[in-house]
Structures are given as C-alpha cells and as structure tokens.
Amino acid sequence: MRHHERPVEPGWRYRLHEIVFEADTPGGRMFDVLLLTAIVTSVAAVMLESVPSVRAQHGAALLRVEWGFTILFTVEYLARLAGVRYPSRYALSFFGIVDLLAIVPTYLSLLLPGSQVLLVVRVLRMIRVFRVLKLARYLAGGEEIAQALRASRPKIVVFLASVVSIAVVMGALLYLIEGEANGFTSIPRGVYWAIVTMTTVGYGDISPGTVPGQMVAAVLMIAGYAIIAVPTGIVSVAFAQRAAHPVSTQACLACSAEGHDVDAAFCKYCGESLAPAREPLPVAGNGDSSAAAR
C-alpha cells in the first residue's frame, strides 16, 4: 500500500510554531521569505538614515518606515514567544535576545535620544532566516562547521598559545638585537612587530635594521605560512569527521533550538520531546490497496 506522511493534527501553538520556526512547510517558507525581505529592507533603511544628506531630506519618512518595521518585528517576536511551550527559554536564547534588541531601541528612542544606534543588531537576524533556502545540505553543512570548530577548540587553543609564546620570545629577542635605535623601544613593541610579521600583514611601521634582526624576521615570515596552514588542517580533519553525521532542519517546539540529528526524538539542548511524530496515511483513491499501490 502506498502511503504518504502528514502531521498529526496539533494545537494552535504547533501550527504557529510550524509557520514562524520551520522552513519545510508552505506557510513557514512564505513567512521566512517575507521576514527576510523585511529585515533586508529595514537594515537598508538604517544605513540610509546614517547618511547626513539623506537624513536631512527624508528623515521624517525614514522614521515612519522604522516605526512600521518595529511594529512588524514586535508582532513577530510575540508570535515566536507564543509558538513555543516555554517562552522564557526562547526569550533567553541567542536569537530571542537579538529579536528583542531589534525592537527595543526604537521604543527607547522615545525616552533616550541616540539609542537607535543599536538598530544595527538587525543584521544578526539575517543569520537565522538563511534557512529560507530550504536546502538541508546547506543548513547541515553550517552545523557541521560549527561542530568541527567546537571539536577543534582544544587543539586550536594550544596552537594559539604556542604562537603567542613564539611572538613573545621573538619580540624580546628583537628588542635585545635592535634596540631603540631601530624602533624597538620595548618588549611589547617587539611582540607587536613579531605578530605583524608572523601574520604576514607587514605594516612597515617598524622593521629590523641589523643583519641578525633581519634573519630572525625571515624565519618569522616563513613560519607565518604555518599560522594559516596548521589551524586550517586541524579544522579540516574535524570537519571531515563530523560530515558523516547529518542534522535535520526541525526546530524544538519548546526552546526553538535547531541542529538535531535526523533520527533524534528529544531536543539535545532542553531534553523536551521534539515535534509530534508523523503518521503514515493511505493515499485516498478508488479501488483496493493493491490498485493504489500500482
């Protein structure tokens, strides 16, 4: 018998959750498209408002546009709080705080002049709505990269500690070799030069003038390539190990967290059961089950 999957009939909160948090339903996809458009437009309005000439000519219109977006994002924020079992968990999450910061400055502008500077935090909101692409492999890839960075953190910390140690030693060495005559007035100044040299930035504001100092500089320049290669290799290995573990686009109904394993039954962040399971229903049609299968 041929079957298709349809969500178990849920309550209003789950239906609202499907729209504002999920991207695998028509309503959720449309919501994300509209939200992405609103966010990009609001960010553009904030950028235009920072231009003195534009602000002088269209300041009143931009203010009305800003209030319109603020009201829209306020409704969205309240909908997100209503769409989860535990609103406080979402309110205290990263994106919950970002959503709040996106609307609070405009209200504060009524009391505190200059608070609209904080409106630039709306740029951060664009990160979340990238799921509108509805391509699981991109979302899974982003989660795999994040997991690879977390898995590589101890090795990267050790590597960076080694780099800092080398910079301190080389900076002190150049301070002894070059001295104040060539701009190395202190050990911190020498450490600054070592960091600039190892990272291949090369500002040129300070450079060794003696042969021994130039030899040390040459060694640091060559070692600078390892600064890029070593952490890249560490993360690449961890990424390859994590790539075999795909994640789903399903958001937790309780805390709105994403990035769960495809076969996960419970949220790995709050422990709550994920969205109601889907039950197979036979395709409606005439004839017996064997005919439907054909």
Image (cartoon, rainbow, N blue to C red):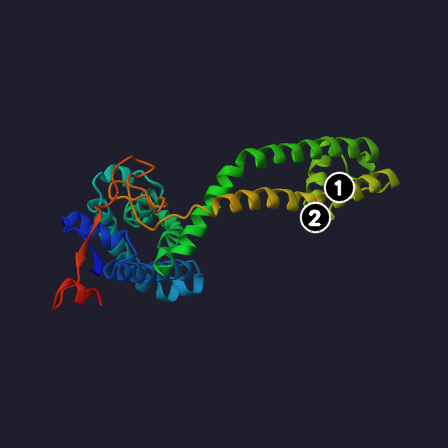
**Residue designated by label 2:** 200
| Residue at 37% from the left image edge and 45% from the top image edge | 259
Q: Is residue 181 left or right of residue 270?
A: right
Distance from the alpha carbon under mark 1 to that under mark 2: 9 Å
**Residue designated by label 1:** 220
Furthest-front residue in view? 290
Identify which amino acid the numbered label 2 is placed on.
Thr
Q: Residues within 10 Å of mark 1 (few under 14, many from 20)?
A: many
Can residue 188 be seen here? The reply is no
Q: Nearer the viewer, residue 165 or 244?
A: 244
- Where 92 falls versus 293 (above or below)? above
- Where 143 falls versus 176 (above or below)? below
Query: Disc 1, disc 2: CB below 8 Å?
Result: no
Q: Is the N terminus in the top left, top right, bottom left or bottom right quadrant?
A: bottom left
Residue 150 in picture, x, y percent from top left: 49, 38
SS class of the residue under badge 1? helix
Residue 184 in picture, x, y percent from top left: 77, 36
Q: Nearer the viewer, residue 30 or 100?
A: 30
SS class of the residue under badge 2? loop
Q: Toward which corner of the image does residue 155 lie, by quadrant? A: top right
Residue 213 in picture, x, y percent from top left: 83, 39
How many badges with numbers are in the image?
A: 2
Furthest-right residue in view? 211
